[in-house]
Image (cartoon, rainbow, N blue to C red):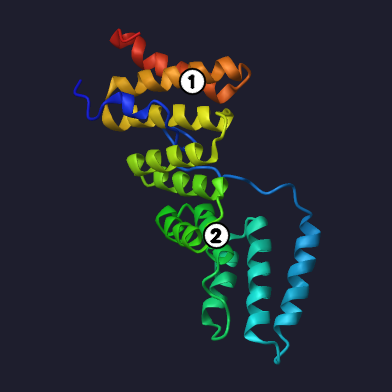
Amino acid sequence: MKRLYPLTLFMALAVVLNCASTDDSVRMIGGYPKINTSSHFAQIESIDKELKISNASDETKSKLYLTKGRLLLELGKYDDSIETLNQIFSLKNANANSPELNLYLGRAHIGKNQYAKAIQYLNQSEKLDKTYNPERKKLVVQSLVAEREYYPALAALTKTYHKGNQKKDEFYYETAAKTYLKMGYDYKNAGFYQKGLQVANLGLEEFPENETLRSIQKECMEVLQPEGKL
């Protein structure tokens, strides 16, 4: 088999993919804690009442729309969240270029599997907010992988772990192994399966009860053993 790139380039890289071989969807990074649904709906109802006040300033409306959009996002109502957040752009005297607004829109589009749009909003959020935010960076990587933009995703996540000086955790090993497995399928290159197996094995040394890594390990071996690559 012809190798497309030196495999050593990917030794310390990881990307996000929820299912390597049969499912291109990805899970939301930094998921929300368990929410009180009733409380969220009550807050939304209260916000809707405030929005009906005719003399409310654009700045006030902007804050209300932003809060409502976040609440809808946490409820998993992605279409409603996007529609609500987009209301801010129609307000003349509102801050429609805030990091939070773009972050919420990015997350909502990920929820709808609209990753190209998510990347645009997440990148804009990063431009507006220079505070280091590893979860936001992982969302960018997650979306890049879903778009099969593997190499930009690998570079982005490497930078995330390097800059954040983060210890390799279950997320790292899972996503790295899944990505190599996916690249093996896409590029028809046994080397990527070998790398996926290597990362899965390393992860299992640290997290022996991790079923995702165990599954990836098994799938890589099923491909490599018949080809005599083990």
Left or right of 205 on screen, residue 61:
right
Q: Mark 2 points at which residue?
A: 103
Residue at the bottom extreme?
55
Left or right of 57 on screen, residue 226:
left
**Residue 131 percent across, percent down from the top left:** 56, 55
Going by the numbered disc 1, the residue's amino acid type is Ala
Q: Residues within 10 Å of mark 2 (few under 14, many from 20)?
A: many
What SS does tag 2 mark? Answer: helix
**Residue 136 percent across, percent down from the top left:** 54, 50
Left or right of 225 on screen, residue 82:
right
Task: Please give the name of the residue rendered at 59% of the width and 65% of the height, measured from the top-left corner.
Answer: 81
| Location of the N terminus (image quadrant) | top left
Going by the numbered disc 2, the residue's amino acid type is Leu
Q: Earlier in the sequence, mark 2 or mark 1?
A: 2
Residue at the left extreme?
2
Q: How crowded is mark 1: few (under 14 residues within 10 Å), some or many (20 or more)?
A: many
Task: Please give the name of the residue rendered at 52% of the width and 31% of the height, measured from the top-left corner.
Answer: 172
Q: In this view, does 67 lie above or below 137?
A: below
Question: In the image, which disc is placed on residue 200?
Answer: 1
Q: In which quarter of the image is residue 224?
A: top left
Residue situated in front as seen by the camera: 100 or 221: 100
Q: In which quarter of the image is residue 198?
A: top left
Q: How far apart are marks 2 and 1 (CA)?
A: 31 Å
